Image (cartoon, coloured by chain):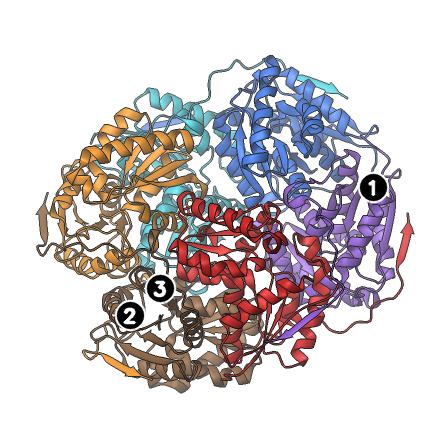
Chain colours: A orange, B cyan, C blue, D purple, E red, F brown
Amino acid sequence: MNQDVLLHVINPNSTASMTDAIGRAARSAARPTTRLLVQNPANTPPSLEGTTDQALAIPAMLAAITQAERDGARAHVIACFDDPGISAAREIATRPVIGLCQAALQTAMILSTRFTIITTLPRAVPHIEDLAARYGVGKSCRRVRAIDCPVLELETNPDAAMRKMRQEIARAKTEDSAEAIILGCAGMVEMRAPLSRQYGLPVIDGVTCAVLQAEALATAEFLTSTIGASAAPYAKMPCPQAHRIML
Amino acid sequence: MNQDVLLHVINPNSTASMTDAIGRAARSAARPTTRLLVQNPANTPPSLEGTTDQALAIPAMLAAITQAERDGARAHVIACFDDPGISAAREIATRPVIGLCQAALQTAMILSTRFTIITTLPRAVPHIEDLAARYGVGKSCRRVRAIDCPVLELETNPDAAMRKMRQEIARAKTEDSAEAIILGCAGMVEMRAPLSRQYGLPVIDGVTCAVLQAEALATAEFLTSTIGASAAPYAKMPCPQAHRIML
Amino acid sequence: MNQDVLLHVINPNSTASMTDAIGRAARSAARPTTRLLVQNPANTPPSLEGTTDQALAIPAMLAAITQAERDGARAHVIACFDDPGISAAREIATRPVIGLCQAALQTAMILSTRFTIITTLPRAVPHIEDLAARYGVGKSCRRVRAIDCPVLELETNPDAAMRKMRQEIARAKTEDSAEAIILGCAGMVEMRAPLSRQYGLPVIDGVTCAVLQAEALATAEFLTSTIGASAAPYAKMPCPQAHRIML
Amino acid sequence: MNQDVLLHVINPNSTASMTDAIGRAARSAARPTTRLLVQNPANTPPSLEGTTDQALAIPAMLAAITQAERDGARAHVIACFDDPGISAAREIATRPVIGLCQAALQTAMILSTRFTIITTLPRAVPHIEDLAARYGVGKSCRRVRAIDCPVLELETNPDAAMRKMRQEIARAKTEDSAEAIILGCAGMVEMRAPLSRQYGLPVIDGVTCAVLQAEALATAEFLTSTIGASAAPYAKMPCPQAHRIML
Amino acid sequence: MNQDVLLHVINPNSTASMTDAIGRAARSAARPTTRLLVQNPANTPPSLEGTTDQALAIPAMLAAITQAERDGARAHVIACFDDPGISAAREIATRPVIGLCQAALQTAMILSTRFTIITTLPRAVPHIEDLAARYGVGKSCRRVRAIDCPVLELETNPDAAMRKMRQEIARAKTEDSAEAIILGCAGMVEMRAPLSRQYGLPVIDGVTCAVLQAEALATAEFLTSTIGASAAPYAKMPCPQAHRIML
Amino acid sequence: MNQDVLLHVINPNSTASMTDAIGRAARSAARPTTRLLVQNPANTPPSLEGTTDQALAIPAMLAAITQAERDGARAHVIACFDDPGISAAREIATRPVIGLCQAALQTAMILSTRFTIITTLPRAVPHIEDLAARYGVGKSCRRVRAIDCPVLELETNPDAAMRKMRQEIARAKTEDSAEAIILGCAGMVEMRAPLSRQYGLPVIDGVTCAVLQAEALATAEFLTSTIGASAAPYAKMPCPQAHRIML
């Protein structure tokens, strides 16, 4: 067991202020002896609001993971609720890779029998529904709701976002009979404390859950499997030439 | 965040030597500052090898959980791979309750794309398959295998058990293309270290995973939901009289 | 074929008046030549409104099943809609064991393409949803509704319960397009007759369905399987000493 | 409750000797006071070995059901393991309609945790797998096996069929860990008694299960729903003219 | 590759005007070089509004398919949204058989992440839900709605039908967050063009999708499998005598 | 209807010879009047054998799709059996986007009741299983097999690949009762013709299926939905600065 570990928290979008907020939440979740490398790459979309945004952010995120592992990181947190590129990250990393969505869902499955996820934009709902289905939550996830607020407005207009969040939590309790709430966006990380106090039910944010899970697996020195579909791709030389034919 | 917590680990069967082994594994998984109350009740079956054995052990286990919470426990681990009585435990506890099977499956879903569970008796296979289905692992769990060895023989004849375990792991790698192995019985907890070194793939035991998860959730002061199906049952006075009619 | 059989109907809670009502319903469902042993144990919760209540009732229920089989019972009905302890009962019984929920769902699948279950308390809804999922009803079960009335009030305030039940049936017809209704509590057994006449759709109660199924299987001398996960647990000596360590 | 009922058992194929065997099994399953109308239509295929055979048999079967209900039948058994036309039969009948496959599966779910179905031809396997999936048996059905013997040879060469059946049961026990066996063809109905005695596990035939279920539901005067998708189609005048255009 | 093919489009009901409308849609979907045999049988129900109507239409439809294949058809379209008899048709045909529902669902899965199906009568909803489940659309199909209008009124009162359709599309956009609409009845084929222009989302009709798919598979000379459950039933002589016994 | 369309076929890896083979297959599947733009980007991995390889290829592939649409492409084929980046491609494209895996599975569901997929490397098996599950094929896909041959060896050592493929097809017929075979890699496209002739069952390759589907949808002028999760991401300015903190 290794009680003094370095965790790598990568925000795949390029908004530094969101990285800072994620860092504060990670710091407050982790043990004092745990060191945190928290970062975001350059030139990725400033928020990931769809699978295209994700696709454009993943290569830089993978490079950061490879480098962080060389620098001694014992586990990685992908700090975006869509868990972008998590399969690829697990191929290249030898240390555990934790996604916010998977960690939050696993926690909600422990703390409640039925829960609701509340995210930012309605367009994210089908994607999160599909993730939840892939992670096997079944009927435990009553519903995925959206506050209809772009990710970046969580910072620029936090009061409006909080007001809409309160409305959706109230609806989740009465309409969905939700016993717990998952905050479905890394940008919502600072909403957790005030909401938990107010509503008398667990309010779960993915950053806290993922950092805790990463720290635990790193301490126990668990490793990602390196065989089968978990193996790293073998090195191949890309062809530097595009090829285009009209037939 | 509370870095110095008391965890309650309850072995629901009444075999003290198994409780001791679980305690050793729990101690080595937990942080030095974490205190552990590890116990088993009296008069429950000495091993839980079916749903009847479980049913007979659950009332005493629930009483122990209630008492441990009064004594300051911040999270509970049910140290049996069948997760017996976990729904009831979550009704009566206000702190998180972690089951070995759920914790091991959640870990395996993070560390691999496909894994195999290896348990003791063939009769446990359908029950574990059903648990895995309820926890939503889908095709990630390739197969549940059994070494055909009663739980108590893990202690009385450890060499034979280890030999059969090695055979099944070898089969899991070739026949199931398993990328990780879950040890499907609390009594297998001390097999983890030697097997991990040998096979080059993650060998996951539920005690370690559950203690880590319990410690993490306790540290973050997560609570079990207390509304809906997660609420405690209201107090009712049992009728002391049996009633029997022939019609 | 054996046309003259003894059936065992066990109400696992300790409310004798509910046992009597179940007995009346069982008697009116069974053939005149069928004898019925209807009973409840002492000291179990007076109503089972959650998995804790169930856990506390199951050991006494299992003892009653073992004894009834010695007394000649040819099939057993667990007269509670949650089907508590049904797997354990099937391990220890050699005769068929029928649960109210499973029997009612099997009947509803024969009589309709879509149905709604109406139970007592909202807290029971997730548990019944999970049972229905395990029994494989899929989309045939449109919804599980609750009349928000504790089990014991079905007896103490039957008019209010009936009024709320009528409201929910009306909603099930219009909102759920339900073609049949399942009464989701053993305590609702006497509502069936008046409701069936009124609503022009099958109203299905579990006691009737389970008694019919038990009688049929007993007559044909079907036995529960005694191999694999259906085998009885082998006898083991419980340790009379609790064990508790602080680590 | 009506203890003296008329049941209608319809073999949709046109082989009278199979109808006689089905009649014998039905008679031995039913109560002495139950009357049985057992029949097959003219001009349908002599065995139903695929969905085409089924399609050609269904219209005559539906006509027989309508007529039997006019003649006082209180429930109908479709005596073919493929449950052909069961949805249509439930639209036009007001009394319960029971299929062999559904009845056998419901019984197997009560008597065991895992079972195997053994049918005649390999080509029937996917169809029965799909039926089992639709009825929601999930992992409880371990496997659908075939003895590779056409339906009509069950009569013309019973010894060979029995020999192959014994081989498949032996394999189901060892390879599938089956705790019960379902005979997956109405023509296998007379195999049940000798096989049950020999193998020490429940051998379930659909005719017995369906007759018992039909008798039970008829006695309790259950009716098929007549609303929604369970309603009879409204009468419409077919156009006597075919229409054909080349475009 | 064969660019000049004959497609067979069979409307299984006996309403010639609906066959004509289907023919017009098929003609406008197909390539100029593709020839179309569009027809309906005599004496089948004038509309298929339930599984009984389907059952009565299938034998004549199968005969038409067999004959069309002799006449050179290279693919078959069953022009009814319930895909009646499609398994049987695939047994007897050697060329591909396409159903409207399957083709429309496959198209909707390509063009959107979430869609809603809108059919005629509420009684068709469970049947279409079951079809969609069998075709594996999962949560992609948000809901099956009905405009509550019998099939034949689509022709006799098209304005009322169109008005109700517009209401349901509006609800599908706001309540279901549908990104595409499937018209769930062959009789709605001429609604597609005006609705697509108006609502700014894909409006998918099964006739167009199925004709395109049939033409593509015919061109590439794909054949239906002829082994296993896809094999034609072997020829058997029906017994011309009905058989009826009272037992 | 537009009978003369431009299709865009994008091979996301950077191996020009594979692009040429895909182009030949696409040309032979398409109608003479259909024009084909077939290309691969520069600097992507030379074969996509895992989710990392995919992640690195997707951004360039998305750029090619955007440009091809500006150049008049009416539909896009992603010519890799993993369907990499297909959700993102559907967000940014207004024309239909077809993946090889989805197209092949849709075709196999039409031509057979049970089929087997045969791919290159064992490590691809879990990924293809997950894709098949997401596309909803259920039990129709009997198994995903691998010939244990890297993608690029399909070109460098075609005889060995063909020999192994023949072995796996033979096993799929006997062990899986497969009625059709899907070739699970774009690099296998030229195996289709010889194998179809030999084995007497449909051999389905994704390139042919996807080109046919793309051509059909393009001809009918279907468009990808542009609302909800199908909408294009709104334009956002990436931050050119990476951000990295140690906490």
Amino acid type for the residue under numbered disc 1: Met
Whole-percent x and y of residue F160? 41, 84
Residue F238 vs residue D34: left or right?
left
Local secondary structure at mark 3? helix
Residue matched to label 1: C1
- Three-letter code for the amino acid on which mark 3 is drawn: Gly
Task: From the top left corner, tell me how far across and down residue E165 is, in percent.
Answer: 50, 49
Q: Chain of mark 2?
A: F
Residue depth check, mark 1 versus mark 2: number of the one nearer the observer = 2
Query: Residue at horizontal 66%, vertical 64%?
Result: E16
Task: Please identify the quadrant where the N terminus of chain C is shown.
Answer: top right
Q: Are marks 3 and 1 in contact (CB under 8 Å)?
A: no
SS under mark 2:
helix
For label 3, count other residues whose C-alpha is less than 10 Å away and answer few (under 14), some (14-19) or many (20+): many
Residue D118 appears in which quarter of the rendering?
bottom right
CB contact under 8 Å: marks 2 and 3:
no
The correct choice, above or below, for E121 with respect to A60 in the image is above
Could you give the CA–CA distance between mark 3 and mark 1, rounded to whole angstroms? 56 Å
Residue F221: percent from the left, percent from the top? 40, 68
Left or right: residue C90 versus residue F40 is right
Q: Chain of mark 3?
A: A
- Marks 1 and 2, how far apart in space? 74 Å
**Disc number placed over residue C42 in the picture, else none:** none
The amino acid type found where label 2 is placed reads: Glu
Above or below C137: residue E55 = below
Which numbered disc covers residue A228?
3
Q: Are marks 2 and 3 on the same chain?
A: no
Q: Nearer the viewer, mark 2 or mark 3?
A: 2
Residue under label 2 = F69
In the drawing, does residue E102 fall left or right of residue D70?
left
